[in-house]
Image: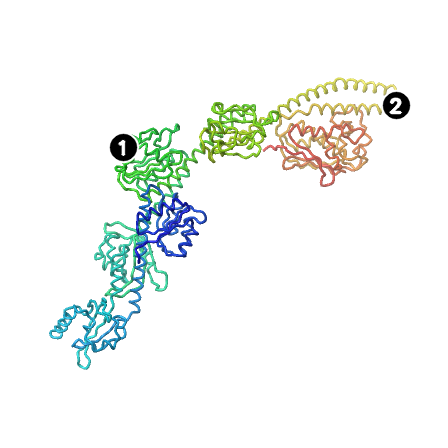
Amino acid sequence: MSDRIPVLLVDDDPDLRAVTASFLEREEDRLAVETAADAAAGLDVLADREVECIVSDYEMPGKDGLAFLESVRERDPDLPFVLFTGRGSEEVASEAISAGVTDYLQKRGGTERYERLANRIVEAVEKRRAERDAEQAVEQFRAVAEGASDAIVTIDTDGVIRFANPAVESVLGYEPSELEGKPLTTLMPERHRDDHREAMERYLDTGERGVDWSNVRFNALRRDGDEVPVSLSYGEFAVDGERQFVGVIRDETERDRHRAFIEHASDVVAVLSRDWRFRYLSPSCERVTGHAPSELLGERSLDYVHPDDREAVESAFASVDPGGTPPSAEYRFRTADGGYRWLESVGSDRIEADGVEGYVVTTRDVSERKERERTLSRLREWTRELNYTRTTEEAAELAVEAVDDLIDAGLSGIHLRTADGDSLEPAALGQSVPALFETQPSYDRDAPEGSRAALAWEAFHGEESVVVDELSTYEPLDESSPAESLVLRPIGDHGLFVVSSPEPREFTDTDVLVAEILSGHLEAALDRIERERRVERLHGATRTLVGADSREEIARRAVEAATDVLGFSIVTVRIHDEAAGGLVPMAVSPHAEELLPERETFTPDGGSLNWAVFESGEPEMYDDIRETDALDADTALRSLLIVPVGDHGTIAIGESEPEVFDGVDEYLAGILATAAETAFQAEARTRRLAERTAELERQNDRLEEFAGVVSHDLRNPLEVARGRTQLAREECDSDHLESVERAHDRMTALIDDLLTLAREGDPVTDAEPVDLGAVVDSCWRTVDTKAATLRAEANATVVADEGRLKQLLENLIRNSVEHGSTGSRTESGDSVEHGSTSSEGRSPSGNRAPPGDSRAEPDDSVEHGGESVTVAVGTLPDGFYVEDDGPGIDPDRREAVFDAGHSTSQSGTGFGLRIVEQVADAHGWSVRAVESEAGGARFEITGVDFAE
């Protein structure tokens, strides 16, 4: 095989692809690098020509590195595949390992990364070549062991070949007939012939064997003159008393080649007997286990397997199926120093050769892989715990504990940037730091070049890890340090993860990957903790917005929350003012006043970004407004974040540096805007309520004045008229006097209902639990119900003013009694508006008529003795109802019956149901008229609170 190594490099970055290919070919002249821009192009290359190793980026358009690996594995499961990625993560590393990646390297550091990559490629290819040669050798060995025929010859005491079997042609190139009659020395090189003759003569004379006849090894001479290594086994026999010898000649060419492979292979090749004893071990056994092969020969292999793994190994190798999948097992093997090392063994077929009989098992050291898997598993547990940390200190301490546990780096620490941004101060330090550092290490931003602090700040401002294998020889560092191995990893904008060791070259690529994954999760945890802290403080600040008593005060407090809590410096709250025609600044932070020119109003046609956000209702974030047509593009303002405050205005937040804001800032600003919108809405409702209250107070004053006039100026003349009518009746008897008295009753009812209507409109302020059923019973006894029937199902306790509740129920019961009869009655909804309905002359408002007046009005059905009505009172999920089985209310008039003055009777006042609605409103209830199940009238009162 040619020593040239064809390599396929797949990367979507053309510049990086070209640089990597050049460096690889310069670092290792055996490498011939062909490139492809993506996975699809890479698969095309694989289909056209031979490639012995693939180097692929992870993040690429189309298929990523892992998907590409999966496609490659479908074509060639064993082709070396190196994932060479710019950004690692725990998830990517784990998936790569699970998918069977050959190696995993980060694109970090300087040009030394290409040297490291070149070495990994060569190692992987050479290992695969060796494994392939081993597979071929085993196949050839198996073919010889199972199917090859050895050459067999017989010779006489003169050394002449008397017989040769057909196999001599395949072994030595002769037809059998060509050898018969020729001396055996024909098959020997000249240098061996004399020795052979002397040995034969000595044996014939003395019977002394100079060599082991069972295995004589030499180079035989083929017909074409080439020499071939063979093994010759002799046997003596007699034919008709004539001594003859038989020789079995076996071509040892393939066996020697296979033996050479085994002797130099990196994996351990062993032969096990049926009772698990070592019959053969290749020399690599000592490198892998520490045991010399001779120390283990004859030993029972299972005795060296960890007790917890023996059962699994026995189960895996219980039987070998020649045509099936080779058995395999991973287990811990006891090494020469008494420790255990993880091995992986794969079984092969049975052999019988060179006096060795048993099963071939190939074993490799997988300790590093198992340790890497164990580390990544524990890393997942640590990162999971980071997700539950609540403070910065807790997260930092946990990260330091994790890195010490995972890569034994006790000389490590988390250094976070101070509030003023001038220093990286330790938030958590490893347990070894106090012993090796006289003072806690901290790093000032203005430290001189060549100092540890300058190196730390350079790493903090970078995007990749800084890895130094030997600090004492590191040229950029002039200051001495107790550490030798060093990994510096930035934790976003928070600070720096310092992982170090006093020993040089202590950290592997896996260790660096662990530190990078851990720092990524720490950054996420610190982001989350900072976000939660800011949200908590923001919620506290936004609660004060609702308590503000004016729009100006709300805007001012919103600016304070944005600056003091969220840490923004340039903040403006603008309110939409229709009179001004746009967005008017209501509150501005001090820094905004210093940096920005004064602008009174942003109008729809002014080209303002604020107006665009206000109109769209969606927030906008600008990394640099100098790249826009913004009005402030010529000012010191660079970053800008604008959030709408509903229909009320906008909050604009800015900074003098570009690319300052991120999604978290937008999220927090959105919370502030929502709180401000709620506060503006509450302020508007409060303002409208105050205006409404003032108007109601003015109306109540006018009603009270009206009630006083009615009570004094109308009732007194009415009482005089009543008295005069009584005197006139005593002097003469006239039918006209009866009509006058009915007119007086009618006027009294009107005055009573007007007074009730005027004085019952105030909201209820002294509500208390009231037994609804007891009130219903009381009202039924108060109202003249005649032959009407009550079905009371109101078993509930409501929160109400008992006096007003009685008035509401009396009016509704009276309405049902008076309209529900089928006598000469008008449609329901007007009966409460009539005059007295009782034999005692009670008026619809509950006031008694003059003594002795027991006459009913002409349209009073109860008085006329019509059919009785059933009145039902029951509860609803949020209230109660009063219904009857009378004629009901025309659907077109169900809303009108509550209007003041509405009546279908000449004697009705028109205020009865209006008073019902007014009492309901005073409680905050609602009332409506509907049809009952019996077709009568039903009044439902809802919004009622029930006492628990």
- Tell me which corner region of the image, top left, top right, bottom left or bottom right, holds residue 484: top left
Q: Where does residue 627 sit, x and y in percent of width and height?
A: 49, 33
Residue 593 place in picture, x, y as percent: 49, 23
Quadrant placement of the N terminus: bottom left
> Residue 55's x, y, as percent?
37, 49
- The answer to whether 576 is drawn above or below residue 930 in the figure is above
Left or right: 804 in relation to 272: right
Given the image, on which type of amino acid does mark 1 rest? Glu
- What secondary structure is marked by label 1? loop
Quadrant of residue 73 within the rendered picture = bottom left
Residue at the spot 33% in from the left edge and 40% down from the top edge: 403
Q: CA distance from mark 2 to mark 1?
A: 130 Å
User: Can you tell which mark lies on residue 289?
Assistant: none
Task: In the rendered view, tell whether residue 275 sits above or below residue 117.
Answer: below
Q: Secondary structure at mark 2?
A: loop
Front position in the image: 320 or 86: 86
Viewed as shown, does residue 12 lie left or right of 611?
Answer: left
Tally of numbered tags: 2
Q: Looking at the image, can residue 42 be seen?
A: yes
- Viewer-proximal residue among 180 and 100: 180
User: How far from the left and from the top, in percent, is residue 532?
Assistant: 45, 33
Between tags 2 and 1, which lies in front? 1
Q: Nearer the viewer, residue 415 or 331?
A: 415
Query: How would you rate the neighbour count of disc 1 (Cα within 10 Å): few for under 14, some for 14-19, many for 20 or more?
Result: few
Residue to which mark 2 is pinned? 734
Q: Is residue 657 left or right of residue 686?
A: left
Q: Which mark is residue 479?
A: 1
Q: Amino acid at mark 2?
A: Ser
Q: Residues within 10 Å of mark 2 (few under 14, many from 20)?
A: few
Residue 870 seen in render: no
Q: Earlier in the sequence, mark 2 or mark 1?
A: 1
